[in-house]
Amino acid sequence: MHIPDGYLGPATCGVLYAVMIPVWGIASKIVKKNLKAKHVPLVAIGAAFSFVIMMFNVPIPGGTSGHAVGGVLVAILLGPWAACIAVTVALVVQALLFGDGGITAIGANCFNMAFVLVFTGYYLYKAISFNSPVTSKRRVFAAGAAAYVALNAAAFCTAVEFGLQPVLHHTAQGQALYSPYGITVALTAMMSEHLLVFGWVEAVITALVVKYLQKQDSSFFQE
Amino acid sequence: MKTVSKLWVGIVFLILLCPLGLLVPEKFRSGAAWGEWGMEEIKEMVGYIPSGLNALSGVWKAPFPDYTFRGWEDKGWGHSCFSYVISAVVGIAVIVVFVFIFGKFLGKKNK
């Protein structure tokens, strides 16, 4: 889901940077207000977790590969704004040091994975786990379901961004300038693989860690 | 052990296991993620390389492209796995330093 340089035209890159700059600003402000010094290591762990879990490429035999993002778990444990910052840090390091995701697409990739994924996952988890005891099974289910839906929401946004390119930018002869596949192809490919495989990976990882932490230190889930 | 320490142990565990994320897709002959193809793959798939894509694709030269060392791309699995693990260590070290600096910077006004 890391869009490389050159797949999105300047309009899409620009708009998504323009959306993310205020989001990062608000996130910094809110985190500054609420985050206690003792929580800083948790943000570092959250960013490190998201970074390393994205290195676990999961194959679709004979097809493409993909991976979980871990952003919903970070959001459940730290809240959406701190998670937005944690996943952003992971994505920026991936782009700058490892060329995983383009630098022109940092706005887009952060919009998909650090914003849409994190906030969808967080609020869905909140809604499903509403009023349930901190050690309840409903919380584990809420975490898994939220992770599944959130990863697919991010994949949906990514597919739409890809799919708009041939419409936005093409030569007089109809050749694409950037990503060449239209919205139908992009949505079909991205959604089928995320609905069938990668969404479940995100769901299982998120639910398992939540279950582990319920036993280990349920103070993580107190509101 | 405190929960935070246990979580760090978990991260170390994931770092050591991360070559699985390299080896398993290879085993199943699955290619790149959708929309993350190289220029040659694109040419094969659509018959041409979109000009804007071609122009922008090399805009950034990452120091460790695709989590490997430059020049180590074809040195075999041992080298790939080693550079993958080192990449994870380097990436996480940079992330931790960055978050702590960011935390200090944000934390000042709290006191």
Image (tube, rainbow, N blue to C red):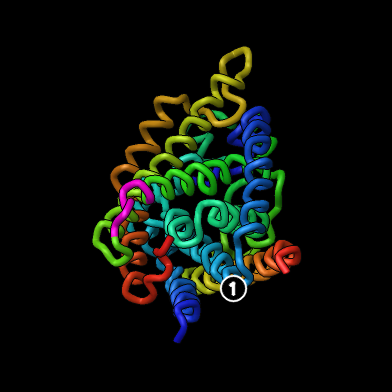
Residue A88 image offset from top left, x and y in percent: 60, 53
Q: Name which residue lies at 48% across and 35% down.
A: A157
Q: Name which residue lies at 44% across and 75% down.
A: B10
Q: Name which residue lies at 43% across and 43% down.
A: A120
Question: Residue most toward the bottom?
Answer: B1
The answer to whether residue A61 is seen in the rendering is no
Q: Which image quadrant for residue A133?
A: bottom left
Q: Is residue A133 left or right of residue A115?
A: left
Q: Name which residue lies at 44% across and 72% down.
A: B14
Residue A179 image offset from top left, x and y in percent: 55, 31
Residue B105 image offset from top left, x and y in percent: 74, 64
**Residue A127 to residue B78: above or below:** above
Chain to which mark 1 belongs: A
Q: Is residue A112 left or right of residue B55?
A: left
Q: Is residue A157 magenta?
A: no
Count every numbered label the image shows and give the total. Answer: 1
Image quarter (top left, top right, bottom left or bottom right) of the C terminus of chain A: bottom left
Q: Which residues are magenta?
A: A126-132
Circle 1: element type: helix
**Residue B78 to residue A159: above or below:** below
Q: Is residue A127 magenta?
A: yes
Question: Residue most toward the left?
Answer: A137
Which amino acid type corresponds to the residue marked 1 in the rendered image? Answer: Lys
- Which residue is labeled 1 in the image? A38
The answer to whether residue B67 is seen in the rendering is yes
Tag 1: Cα neighbours inside 10 Å, few (<14), some, or many (≥20)?
few
**Towards the viewer: B54 or A38:** A38
Q: Is residue A135 left or right of residue A155?
A: left
Residue A87 image offset from top left, x and y in percent: 55, 55
